[in-house]
Amino acid sequence: MFNGLTLGALLVIVAMGLTIIFGALGVVNFAHGALYAVGAYAGFVAYEYTGSFVAAMAAGAAFLMLVGIVIERGLIRLYYQRPKEDQILVTFGVGIVLVEGLRAIFGGLNRNLPAPSWAGGIVNLRVTLYPTYRIDVLAIVGLSLVLLYFILYRTRLGLIVRAGIEDQLMVNILGINVTRTFMTVFGLGAMAAGFAGVINAPIVTVSPDMGADVLVQSFVVIVIGGVGSFWGAVVGGLIAGEILSLAAMIEPAYSQVALFAVMALVLILRPQGLFGVQGRQ
Amino acid sequence: MSTAPAITRPRRRTPWPELGMVAFLVAFPYAIPYLGGTIDTANRILDWGLFGLGFDLLFGFTGLLSFGQAAFFGAGGFVASYLLTAPVTDNVLLALLAGTVAAAIFGAIVGYLSLRRAGIYFAMLTLAFGEMFYFLDISPLARWTGGENGLAGVPTPHLGLGFHLNTPLGVYAFIAVLFFFGFWFALRLIHSPFGAVLRAIRDNGERTAAVGHAVAKYKLAVFVIAAAYGGLAGGLLGLLQGFMPPDAFYLETSGQLVVQTVIGGAGTLIGPMVGAAVWLDLYTVLQNIAGVGALWQMILGVIFVVLVTVFRRGLCGGAVLLWRRATAVPPPPEAAAESAMRSEPAVSAPEPRAPIVRPPLTGPVVLATRNLTKRYGGLTAVDDVSFELREGEVRAVIGPNGAGKSTFFNMLANVIPPSAGTIEFKGDDITGLGATRVCQLGIAKSFQINQIFVSLTVRENLRIPAIARTYGSFHPSMLKTVGDDAAVNARIAEAAAAVQLTDRLDTPAAALAYGEKRRLEIGLALATQPQVLLLDEPTAGMSPAERADTVRLLKRIGAGMTIVIVEHDMDVVFGLADCITVLFNGRKIAEGTPEAIQANPEVRVAYLGSQAAHEPA
């Protein structure tokens, strides 16, 4: 139950990054899983140098913001006028380059990032013993979500992003400074992925391919929740996390399959997703 | 008929591609050592090429980008390998067939689910479902698939009667024959009516549906075909390796297929094979360079990104483009196109100049609406509109901006569903049937903003509605050559003559002048041979001269046809319409002959504002 919550919370952050990039830029970022892995490695390197987990989180987030901006300025901006398929292809290609780059620099071996010292140990929750770090993750994710919510619902940038999710064309027509907005949003989205990578690093092992599963799962989250909804991503992420961990308790072999079965069910019963609006593609 | 269509003669396609492919397949195993590969490399290239043929039909020709093809590659491979190693059968061909069929069935299921969402969702969903097959393979089904170990001991192909193909060249021959069969089928398919519709879907799915094709069925059919190709290639992978690895199901397998297809060139059939050759060759070459070997996938990734960015057609697509440029006849100078357009008045000159006096309309009612209403939240765009259209009538629907004309019109064509009320065609309720079925019944719409198939020629454009009328909303005719179809060609010729594009038939639609595009737009609706033609601002954006030409053209088309026209230009309206319906604030405020409407005070108020009514005329 709590494992599901932790996993779900991470998926929420990753999916949120995907959603805001899609919402503002209209681009589905197939490199999102790779950015998540880059974030984990960035955190790993920062931790090696400083020995501080807080520094690792900050470095991971900041570095990914930078990576995101570089990718957007260098490549993605050439694609806004091109077909969706081309956008998917190019982000997919960027993902390959990033993952293989990690492999070239760090080798294919798994790395471990230890949980921060202030979050080591185990908590007695009366019902179950639970690693403290996982609870901290929940707190960290909760805080970041509040921050994201604030950005999306209380700032000018958020207004533009949400408007873009509603009606891309209209936002472009209104003459908003898209260059800066797009750059910032892609950076923020990449940062969300990278941040999730750092905070998840102590729970899983760090490897160049660690992002592939997360990419697929965050797609499932978006399909279940419906693109274009903050709460869709939140609820979709938590549902996905719970399905994965609950199914794993009952029958581990089927945990991943159960997730896809639920996605198929949502597609049949409510193709636009739980929080999606009908007719929006 | 002064414009005699001289274009109906079918042109037989010379089987050059087939002959070329045979020559290539015979020479390939002897040439590959010079390219640094072995016959085993050649086998792999052909296997990936076969896998890619199906994917190219799906992505290159229909525009559906799937990231889940590994599911079918793996499914076909494991079904075939299981049957041969269990062993259930020792018949290799039977096992391959079973694998192919199994993959096709999985394709139908995954396709049904994934195609419920279009565009980006489709790519995301296929990726997700592809992963599901991987997870199914490695644990719940591990009893049969060997889990993460795969299935070892797959026998080499043999055809019975003591024919064991256990030499590399023997395996090559086996794969080459199957590859050729796959290539032949794909080639026939893209030249068939079915293939023509696929290309139209890639260009503009909505318009393809609007001219009467059941787009969802076509998409599902091509998805199943692509899955079957994947299944066959997967089965062959097990045979040629003697081992069926679980990584056939990996996300990387789907990715590799996409990358190879784009590098080789999507939409060329042989592109995926060329891409596979590049992939395997690059791998071999880079492995031998010290310090670079480990980077080979990254280098490939960079090449891929660069190709997608600046050279989207890939190697084969680029070659085709260069060859076309080298052999192309220089396009006719602007003047020629100009004169072609100017010659229209001459064509229509024999017609009477005076307005056509029609007999009073007493024909049966063809199209009618009863209390048609459309609400958007609190706004009622169309409010309780009832109207009747008689056979042979030309009806104009007018009204100031925001009167609800377009909404009303889109409801007539079943593009949007009404909130209340019904639409009847020849007495039958057609409300909610959808644009495709309504078009098949005989109501066609031309759009206010051109919705033509820009990457097709004029002939290929008109072919799409002609196929819909000839074959119905869905017809799996994949082996027929559409260019030879007399019924389709006759319909193309007729529609082209009606919109005066007969001498532009082989021009790409993108290269047409604006007025010609507008006429092609009308031609697309006309080629469905509708009983009722709905024209949404046919002269939008035209110059005054073009407008006059279009009015003449519509008059000629309109003789004997039932038409509803929405138009802002009053010259066009009063020049064409038998009867006018005026909408204002969503309501019908007047209906009658052009003369009656001109004199109607309420209409004046609607157009000129309430103040005008108080001023003396």
Image (cartoon, grey):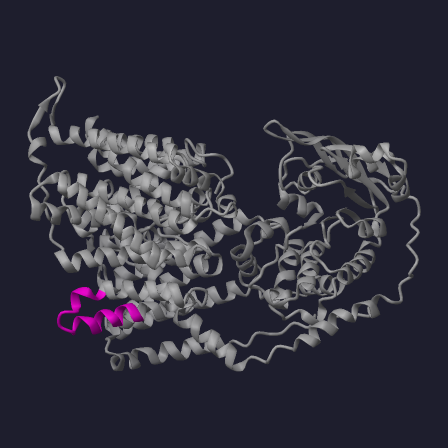
Estimate the x, y position of residue B37 in percent, counting from the top left. 24, 76
Q: In the image, is residue B134 above or below residue A107?
A: above
Q: Quadrant of the N terminus of chain A?
A: top left
How many numbered dots are placed on residues in this image? 0
Query: Is residue B143 in view from this perspective?
Result: no
Q: For this rendering, which residue is in front, B330 or B246?
A: B330
* View extreme (top): residue: A126
Residues rendered magenta in the picture: B278-296
Q: In the image, is residue A246 above or below residue A72?
A: above
Left or right: B64 as drawn, with respect to B327? left
- The quadrant in which residue A117 appears is top left
Estimate the x, y position of residue A82 in percent, counting from the top left. 45, 57
Estimate the x, y position of residue B158 in percent, counting from the top left. 29, 66
Does the magenta-highlighted stretch encompass residue B447? no
Estimate the x, y position of residue A252 in percent, counting from the top left. 20, 35
Q: For this rendering, which residue is in front, B396 or A57?
A: A57
Q: In the image, is residue A238 above or below residue A220?
A: above
Q: For this rendering, which residue is in front, A14 or A163?
A: A163
| Image point (56%, 79%), residue name | B328
| Image point (65%, 78%), residue name | B333
| Image point (42%, 31%), residue name | A275
* View extreme (front): residue: B615
| Image point (85%, 49%), residue name | B574
- The quadrant in which residue B381 appears is top right
Does the magenta-highlighted stretch encompass residue B281? yes
Left or right: A199 as drawn, with respect to A88? left
Q: In the image, is residue A24 above or below residue B154?
A: above
